[in-house]
Each structure stands twice: as C-alpha cells, then as structure tokens.
Amino acid sequence: MNQIHFVTERSSKSTLESKEVVMKKMNISDDYLLRAHRNAVTLKLDRNFICILEKEIKRRNLLLYR
C-alpha cells in the first residue's frame, strides 16, 4: 500500500507543488481521476485542487467533458 505524506507549507505555491508531487506518485486509474475531477467540480472544492486534477488529466492526454 502506498503511503501518502502531505507537506504543509506557508507558501501556497509550495503547497500546490507538493500536492502535484503526491498526485504523480499515486497510481490511480484514468476513470477514477476523471470521476474525482467531476466530483470536485460538482462539490465546488478548492480551485487549486481542481487545477491539480486538470494538470494530471492533461498530462495523461485524457478528454475532459464539461
């Protein structure tokens, strides 16, 4: 099982970068990633989190339907 450690930083840029590193280390399926994005948008979660998901979706060359 993968262990995930979140790094808390004062700088939002550093925090965003550390969350992106965590996202890259997670081996989640394309389907789960797309579902997570859809749910994050529906629930109006933090915009930075949604951006991280969108970057990963783009990196994987997946289509994002809105």
Image (cartoon, helix red, strand yellow):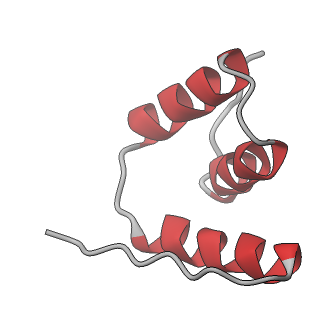
Residue 47 drawn above or below residue 37: below
Judge left or right: residue 27 versus residue 43.
left
| Location of residue 32 in the rendering, given as x and y in whole percent from the top left corner | 41, 35
Question: Picture quarter containing residue 60?
Answer: bottom right
Instruction: Say which of 44 and 61 sits in front.
Output: 44
In x, y percent, where is residue 62? 63, 40
When asked about the image quadrant of residue 59, the answer is: bottom right
Residue under the image location 63 percent in, 80 percent down? 8
Q: Looking at the picture, tell me which residue is in the foreground, 26 or 14.
A: 14
Number of marks: 0
Residue in view at x 73 percent, y 75 percent: 15
Quarter that holds the C terminus: top right
Which quadrant, please, contains the N terminus? bottom left
Q: Position of residue 52 (x, y in %)?
A: 71, 55
The residue at 57%/22% (across/down) is: 39
Residue 45: x percent and y percent? 71, 33
Q: Which residue lies furthest to the front in this view?
A: 10
